[in-house]
Image (cartoon, helix red, strand yellow):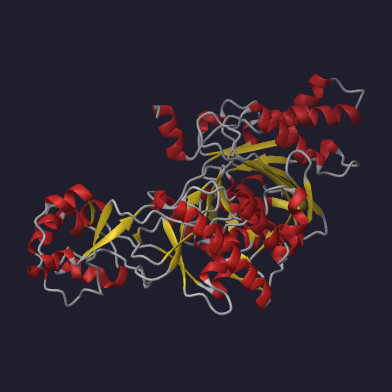
Amino acid sequence: MSNLRLQKKSTGSFYTPEPLARLLAQEVLNCLPVNTIWKDLRILDPAAGEGGLLLPFARELLVRRHAQEPSQTPHFLLEDILYRQIFAADISQVALAKLPLPIEHCYTGDALGAADKKSVLEQFFQTPFDIILANPPYIGQKGNAAIFTQLRQNPLWSRYFTAKNDLSYYFFYLALHLLKPGGIAGFITPPYFATAAGGKMLRQVLRSQATFLRLINFEDRHLFRDADPHTLLSVFQKGQLNKICQVGEKNPTFLCQKNLFYGPDVFLQTHSHSKTRPLISRMAVAQHTLEEIAHVSNGLMTGCDRAFILTEKQKNSLPFTEKETTKLRPFFKSSDIRAYVPNTNARLWLIDFFYPNDRELDINEYPHVLAHLNQFKGRLLARKQNNNGINKQLAKGNFWFGSVRRKLNFEGEKLVIPHRAKTVSAAYTNAPWYASSDVYFITDPKPPYTLWSILGLLNSAPYLEWLRMNGKRKGELLELYSAPLKQLPIPVLSSNQQSQLETLTRTIYQYKCGDTANISSLQTELDKLVATFF
């Protein structure tokens, strides 16, 4: 990675390419009434940089102003826009100095600063804005404690502080704070806030205080040269209004505000799939969710995989006693999972020492395991974790415990799902099958549901489409974390439907175990069957 990209990534600053900035300007202006007096608008970018959003916006505004004021020259109108209508703020004085704006229209400093519940921009510019544009810095809390401590202590933003939120979220709050009632905001951000666990507060605020007018998720189109290829254009209006949102760039889906948000975590719909919309709408009102009919949990965390996970070669080279061997468990990775049938031939082995399960364990009875773990003693003692009270054990010098062993039976029957994949690949196994937290486990189904019926649902086309539209995504990869899985809709099934689903799923499973038969016709039959449940 180049030094420039490292610098941009550390500050969360990636400058908007001209075509994207121009598109944002057009989408924002198109959301305003046709009778808008263009010369009366006040426009702010609170993270303006060198004007990557403001200058293209000024040029688009010029076209509309010239249509309303044909007697004025384009040169006069552009100067009037820049000297009277455009405002900017940025932490970099060097960047702001490059903008052709009057000095009184530029604020140098932290746009999120506040005093007595009033933002510094509110005090500096004094008048609310008609339009706010932003490509805000996208910085998470990890490694940036000082920034988020200031926000947490800030009287204006403290109520919005939650775990795992992002600096960019506060620019949404700032926009709502600085806009006039009915004002319009246009943002360029990654799409993660739409489904991220830490973005729930933001989505709740946007649902209650704003109206989305336009959402374009560019999927895997790499619009930013130096950033990850995930970009969302969003346009929203301040206030709760009965308006339709266009979702998608070409052939958009038109959604009312009620249908734009879904699920208990208030996920925001950013994908357009008009052909499957009727089915997805029916799935959205299903009576149950997966977490209501089964237990969903991710795997274990060792705190140091190099210490607790052995390769086959390491396992065979260490002179373990018979008693020590009883503490080795077959360990798998998410790459061992294929739809219906996972790999069950272990190439890795877990040293199953976990607190508090093994609190009575006499480590001296496991001399060769202890000798192996002792190589990592410094790193293991340096762990800053309080899972299951392990911090007290570390304080005593008891370094040989892993961090978190989930309360699930890794030895019993279960479904396993990789946390990130191009498609849903749920698999069934009743063999000992241990894995890290990048694998999710589904266990303990409530009657009349069984693991077989859940397996069939999850591996069907309707559920893949649901997750593509409503789940978490990173480009073309589905992020099958706890919330998207737990909130999967589950239909009420008659005994006949349950029997059909389970029989068909078991048949596909048996064929997959043989790994030779073509199951495409059976899979098509399953897809059609599941669609009839909604």
Q: Residue at x 75, y 27 (%)?
A: 59
Q: Position of residue 161 (x, y in %)?
A: 51, 61
In the rendered view, tell whether residue 3 sits above or below residue 314.
Answer: above
The answer to whether residue 526 of the structure is visible from this angle is: yes
Which of 323 and 469 lies nearest the eye of the viewer?
A: 323
In the rendered view, tell whether residue 80 sits above or below residue 240.
Answer: above
Which of 334 and 27 lies nearest the eye of the viewer?
A: 334
Quadrant for the N terminus in the image: top left
Q: Which residue is drawn at 55% across and 61% down?
A: 507
Q: Where is residue 292 in the image (x, y as percent from the top left)?
A: 57, 75
Quadrant for the C terminus in the image: bottom right
Q: Residue at x 70, y 64 (%)?
A: 284
Which of 168 and 121 lies nearest the eye of the viewer?
A: 168
In the rendered view, tell whether residue 506 sits above or below residue 183.
Answer: below
- Looking at the image, the residue that sits furthest to the bottom is 447
Q: Where is residue 186 in the image (x, y as percent from the top left)?
A: 69, 43
The image quarter in which residue 62 lies: top right
Which of 70 and 125 lies nearest the eye of the viewer?
A: 70
